[in-house]
Amino acid sequence: MTKNNTFTIDKIFLFFSILLGCFPILTFRMRSVLTIIWGVFGVYIFFKQNKKLKYNTEFSIFVIPYLLILLSLFYSTNIEYGLGMLTKMLSFVIFPLVFYLNRDFFLKKHIYKIFDFFSISVLILVLFQIGKVFYNYDFISSSLTLQEIKSNGFISVTDIAIEKVEQIKLRRFRNYIIEISNTHTTYQGLWICLTIFYLGLKSFVSEKKVITIISVILIAIFILWLYLISARMPFLALVVSLILVIIIFSKFSLKKKVIVSLIPLLVLIVLLSFHNPFSIRVKEYYNTGFSILGESSGPGEFNSSNVRNGVYYCDIKLIKEVPFFGVGLGDVQDNLNDCYQENINSKVYKWHTYNTHNQYAFFWIASGILGLISFLALICINFFNSFKKKNILLFYLTSITTMVFFTENILQRSDGVVFYCFFIGLLFFNKLKK
């Protein structure tokens, strides 16, 4: 093969890498097709360079969690469901593999270009939603409909407390956002958090005032939208991770580290101090506590916090019953549904399918204690690599996802598994100087 042909294939591979970075505005089918094409080109480039495939401990740590849930199918009953889950999570293997094979391919400028296009795609998604919200503002802000009143277990709006009315309207708004974007607000929140941090780094190191000004304006827009969609855990992860980055990686004096770290913390406190969509969602935790819904619980008592409490109750119950090997990937959801019905028996768990809502619990229940340990090892090696190479982006990404893993099954949906595995693989297997 001529050098010119090799150069062309390299450019095509890079083009598809950048295009994959725009996944927030791509349909699920487009993501799947692009991932296959991109993966084929990546493997082809590796073998055309006559490189030998060698065993690598770091790469093994990336794929072991997936292999363990794959092996758990041998003692699963619902094989069809398990195979469906493995297909959804296939990016868990594809992205690390291709990035590992081409670990010397992506230069710093290539990585930044991918992040640039990712940021642009997130901005397009947010602006599209903002436009739709303004256009349909009358519907979003209108009084409760008769259907909303009845579905929440009330006869008339006069029977509903003001705080409950606001919760129902906020739920209406969030459902509208999910419907028009086809993306849950939690995943949007993660995408926005990474974009905010990347723009912040860009404005910090740039010598051009125009880039700094544009970055600051975009950061303000993203923070405002993150606040409006009230993505609780991503927002908290953003604040905590920023503080950790400042403390660990900045060369500020101790006094300055403390002062700068207080800024995101104060922003969070201010947001919680007055009545707004974000504080309404956060205060649910305080008001609900550890209460769990029961058979007699009416629709008016349901909120995201007490529903989650029931989910976590069943997570812990299943972990206690099968701590060593788990129930098998195919039977995770069936066992959860049985627990909801037999131990909680609340109507809300029949209206929707609720997964473990905790990534750590998912691996433990699916493939036992080894599954959990392998997943924790993956997180630890990413933290270690980020410290070793002073890779702030990798550290920040690992930090925000590690926290959100406590409340969401990020890797069970395309929006989450593509986001996590694509950027973790890109940043881990490529050299990015600070």
Image (cartoon, grey):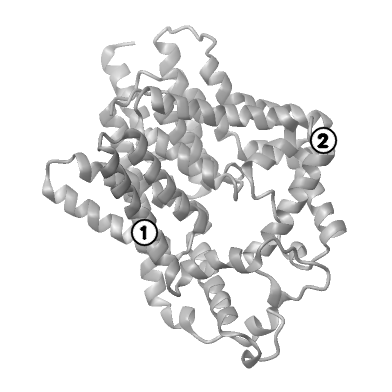
Decide if residue 5 is in sight here.
yes
**Quadrant holding the N terminus:** top left
Residue 170 sits above or below residue 82 on the image = below
In what element is the residue under mark 1? helix
- Which label is found at residue 266? 1
Residue 28 percent across, percent down from the top left: 52, 47
Nearest to the observer: residue 24 or residue 44: 24
Q: Amino acid at mark 2?
A: Ser
Label 1 crowd (10 A; few <14 / some 14-19 / many >=20): few
- For residue 325, which quarter of the picture? top right
Residue type pointed to by label 1: Leu
In depth, the one of 52 and 347 nearer the eye is: 347
Percent position of residue 183, x then y: 51, 56
Q: Is residue 422 above or below residue 400?
A: above
Q: Nearer the viewer, mark 2 or mark 1?
A: 1
Element under disc 2:
loop
Residue sitting farthest toward the front: 255
Label placed on residue 76: 2
- Residue 145 on image: x %, y %: 59, 86
Q: Mark 2, residues whose alpha carbon is within 10 Å: few (<14), some, or many (≥20)?
A: some
Q: Residue at x 81, y 40 (%)?
A: 320
